[in-house]
Image (spheres, grey):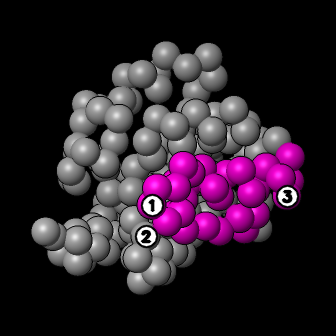
Amino acid sequence: MLQLLYDNYEKHQLKKFMQADDITYLKQAIANSRKSKEQGNFPAGAIVVNDGKILASEISSPYPGLFHADSKAVTQAFKNAGVLTGATLYIGLESCLMCIGVAYWSGLRRIVYAVPKTKVSGSYYETPQDTNKLLQTFNEKLETTHITELEQEALKVIKEWEKQHES
């Protein structure tokens, strides 16, 4: 019984520690989103972290660029470190299916984001539908974590970009 209590305490402490790291790294991804917006690109930024080391940090490509910030960051991290087992992708805006596929095939199994796709225009994605059910069918589990504490900060950058691009 004591071992069970101790194990649960350890898991709780680890989760609190991961949450603090997640917030720190996600703030860096949001800063990349802001940088991307300032350069006139879509306001998405991403970083890939493994064992406390940033393997890649990217912003969106100029339109019409093929790769989004998350695909670029994962591709660069893969070039730098090889298979991304144990790595985490941090992105301001929930990843699209293309970027999830790139992350999955790189070996990455954890994505942390601030803004869910349901909070922005459905035209930013292949489909406005929730794709989490599709992720549950993958051969290997892909964990996605929404950090609500940073949602408004990241959403503000997207709204500023949308205002700049109103017709």
Name the residue at 32% across, 57% down.
Answer: 115
Residue interval drawn in magenta: 54-82
Q: Which residue is mark 1?
A: 63
Task: Identify which amino acid the numbered label 3 is placed on.
Answer: Asn
Residue 27 visible? The answer is no
Residue 40 visible? The answer is yes
Task: Identify which amino acid the numbered label 1 is placed on.
Answer: Tyr
Give the crowd class for mark 3: few <14, some 14-19, many >=20 residues within 10 Å: few
Return the x and y of residue 21 as percentages of the image width and height.
Answer: 58, 67
Q: Is residue 28 left or right of residue 105?
A: left
Which one is in front, 74 or 23?
Answer: 74
Q: Earlier in the sequence, mark 2 or mark 3?
A: 2
Residues at marks 3 and 1, CA–CA distance in whole angstroms: 26 Å
Residues at marks 2 and 1, CA–CA distance in whole angstroms: 7 Å
Return the x and y of residue 161 as percentages of the image width and height.
Answer: 28, 73
Q: Is the C terminus in the top left, top right, bottom left or bottom right quadrant?
A: bottom left
55 up-or-down from 156: above or below: above
Viewer-nearest of labels 3 and 1? Answer: 1
Asked whether 70 falls inside the magenta stretch, the response is yes
Viewer-nearest of labels 2 and 1? Answer: 1
160 up-or-down from 133: above or below: below
**Mark sitting on residue 109:** none
Q: Which residue is mark 3?
A: 80
Q: Please say if the residues under marks 2 and 1 sit with CB atoms less than 8 Å apart.
A: yes
Name the residue at 47% across, 74% down.
Answer: 36
Q: Earlier in the sequence, mark 2 or mark 1?
A: 2
Question: Label 2's element?
Answer: loop
